[in-house]
Image (cartoon, rainbow, N blue to C red):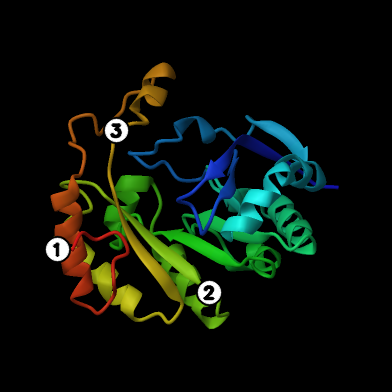
């Protein structure tokens, strides 16, 4: 029986998938995002060990909220796909109990490693950090091609996705980047939602508490005007931005 490492559990999540959800933050991440607000999830050896059955039992106390709101569980992180075998077992057990499953991922994974996960995945929240390969590497330590490849594969399998993009002033908010994101989203048939998430510094204290320098300390938070501008650029390609202010 596979065991997984879980950093923490949010029992009443309302933004990481439809309805009221239990958000399972997996331990470990291959990315090194400069704006990461869960810096303490990077270490693969941290967290608490669970079997899939133990974890489902733990969160099923909130099943009445899921059922009444159309919610379920979301595997987040860190990067949940690092623990693909455990995640596949977890989602399989969830579907046995008719629980809606959502995967929140950077997409930095080889598709063959998560085939069994996707067999029982109802929705994928897919983060496009920066659509330019080299700029993505500067921001996260890895390129974006695996993410784009996964998006296309999910389209082929008719698995719905919510595309997400964190808007970081001066880094991810260029017209070229946003326009290319809009163009890419428009090329897919499985995008149920596209969200522009304003960059914030609420996770900086985690870096400071760990004694690690936060490189983006001089970058301001994105505001409503920034998000509205980004939405306008993306929507030129015929893709509706869910949280745009009209």
Q: Earlier in the sequence, mark 3 or mark 1?
A: 1
Label 2 sits on a secondary structure element that is: helix
For image coordinates 51% across by 72% down, the residue present is: 160
Residue under pointer 2: 154
Q: Look at the numbered disc 3 and give the secondary structure of its residue.
A: loop
Q: How far apart are marks 2 and 3 (CA)?
A: 32 Å
Observer able to see residue 28: no
Residue 140 % position (x, y)? 37, 46
Q: How crowded is mark 2: few (under 14 residues within 10 Å), some or many (20 or more)?
A: many
Which residue is disc 3 drawn over?
Answer: 201
**Label 1 Cα neighbours within 10 Å, binned few <14 / some 14-19 / many ≥20:** few
Return the residue at label 1. Answer: 175
The residue shown at (48%, 49%) is: 14
Provide residue 206's location: percent of width, then percent of height: 41, 25
Q: Which residue is drawn at 43% across and 72% down?
A: 192
Quarter occupied by residue 184: bottom left
The residue lying toward the viewer, choosing from 229 and 87, is 229
């Amino acid at each position: 029986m596979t065991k997984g490492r879980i950093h923490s559990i949010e029992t009443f999540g309302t933004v990481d998938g439809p309805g009221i959800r239990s958000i399972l933050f997996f331990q470990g991440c291959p990315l090194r995002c400069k704006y990461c607000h869960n810096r303490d999830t990077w270490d693969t050896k941290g967290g608490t060990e669970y079997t899939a059955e133990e974890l489902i039992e733990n969160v099923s106390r909130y099943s009445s909220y899921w059922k009444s709101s159309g919610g379920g569980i979301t595997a987040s992180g860190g990067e949940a796909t690092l623990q693909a075998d455990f995640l596949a077992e977890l989602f399989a057990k969830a579907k046995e109990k008719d629980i809606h499953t959502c995967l929140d991922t950077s997409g930095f994974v080889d598709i063959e490693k998560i085939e069994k996960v996707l067999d029982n995945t109802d929705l994928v929240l897919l983060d496009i950090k920066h659509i330019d390969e080299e700029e993505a590497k500067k921001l996260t330590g890895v390129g974006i091609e695996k993410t784009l490849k996964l998006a296309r594969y999910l389209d082929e399998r008719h698995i719905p996705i919510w595309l997400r993009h964190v808007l970081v002033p001066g880094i991810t908010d260029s017209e070229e980047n946003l326009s290319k994101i809009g163009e890419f989203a428009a090329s897919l048939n499985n995008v149920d939602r596209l969200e522009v998430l304003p960059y914030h510094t609420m996770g900086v204290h985690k870096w400071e508490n760990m004694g690690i320098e936060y490189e983006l300390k001089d970058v301001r938070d994105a505001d409503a005007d920034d998000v509205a501008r980004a939405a306008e650029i993306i929507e030129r390609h015929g893709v509706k931005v869910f949280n745009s202010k009209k």
